[in-house]
Amino acid sequence: APQRRRAAAAAAVGAPLPLRRRAAASTAAGEAAQVRLADLHLGQQLVGTVVQIYCPAGVAVEVGCPETLGFLEVEEFRDGFPFEGPFSFKIGDQVTVRVLDVDPVATLDAGVPDAHGDHGDSGRLRLTRRSGALERPPRYRADTSKPARLEPFQELPPGSWLEGEVVRMSNWAAYVKVVAPCGTAFVGILHDAEFAGAFAHEAIRGLRVRVRVLEIDTECRRLLLTMRAPPEA
């Protein structure tokens, strides 16, 4: 029983599926022609098979590239905000995707390797199911060399609006980088219950938004945001 619980916990945080399930999923998709990573190009359409589910980050997709799996981030699942999370997919699902990023020399280690040494997100091949333009700002990387400061946001007058940038999404929130007047930046959480206007239809990484501070949780170091206007006095 303890072993089963540990296995279930590992799956919940994104451990790869057993090799036999990956092989079965690949077989279900048929014998697709292999393609070298260096031959893939931005916007190229591919048909692949979901072989790993990483919650909350996304799903790994076998696209016939022997060098790596492709990774479909949750924020690239669909146009607008991705209300459906990674478990909206099943192992073996066929998906039509476009190439979003190709970086043959990436060394990102995000996920536990399976028997082939594959990770959920190697950083070498990112995919999208969105339509439209493929330009995206660089992915946000937090500066972990020093603690993020919440104090400047505590000094804001009540009801103050801030300009922010969507840097990441899960299926329940957008993560928005905001900057206090003193220049201090912090990535806050914009829960889907706090969306307003057309945001749910327009949401994409890099989108500029206008938000207010809803709550400051100093104990957990969290900044909760809202797009909704303050209640009238």
Image (cartoon, grey):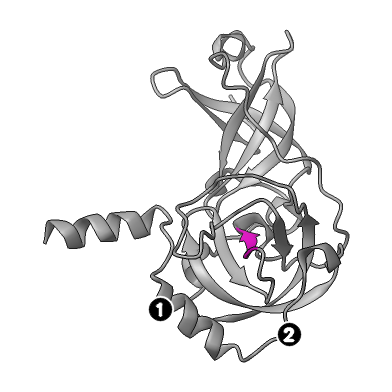
> Hey, which quadrant is residue 167 in on the image?
top right
Image location of residue 136, percent across then percent down: 82, 48
Relative to 142, 127 lies left or right: right
C-alpha span from label 2 to label 1 = 21 Å
Q: Residue at x 59, y 31 (%)?
A: 188
Mark toward the start of the polypeptide (2 vs 1): 1
Residue density around tag 1, few if under 14, some if 14–19, many if 20 or more, within 10 Å: few
Label 2, residues with CA under 10 Å away: few <14, some 14-19, many ≥20 = few
Secondary structure type for disc 2: loop
Residue at 69% x, 35% y is 140
Position of the C terminus, as image quadrant, is top right
Residue at x 70% of width, y 54% of height: 124
Image-quadrant location for residue 179: top right
In the rendering, which numbered label is found on residue 33? 2
Q: Is residue 180 visible?
A: yes
Q: Is 201 or 70 nearer to us in this picture?
A: 70
Residue 159, above or below 209: above
What secondary structure characterizes most of the magenta part? strand
Does residue 123 sit above or below 42 in this rendering?
A: above
Contact (Cβ within 8 Å) of mark 2 with mark 1? no
- Residue type pointed to by label 2: Ala
In this picture, residue 195 sits left or right of residue 9:
right
Q: Is residue 5 above or below residue 97?
A: above
- Residue 232 in picture, x, y percent from top left: 61, 29
Residue carrying label 1: 20
Question: What x and y, as percent, mark residue 185?
Answer: 68, 20
Q: Nearer the viewer, residue 6 or 230?
A: 6
Front residue of 121 and 227: 121
User: Residue 141 appears at what percent x and percent y?
Assistant: 66, 32
> Which residues are drawn in magenta?
68-73
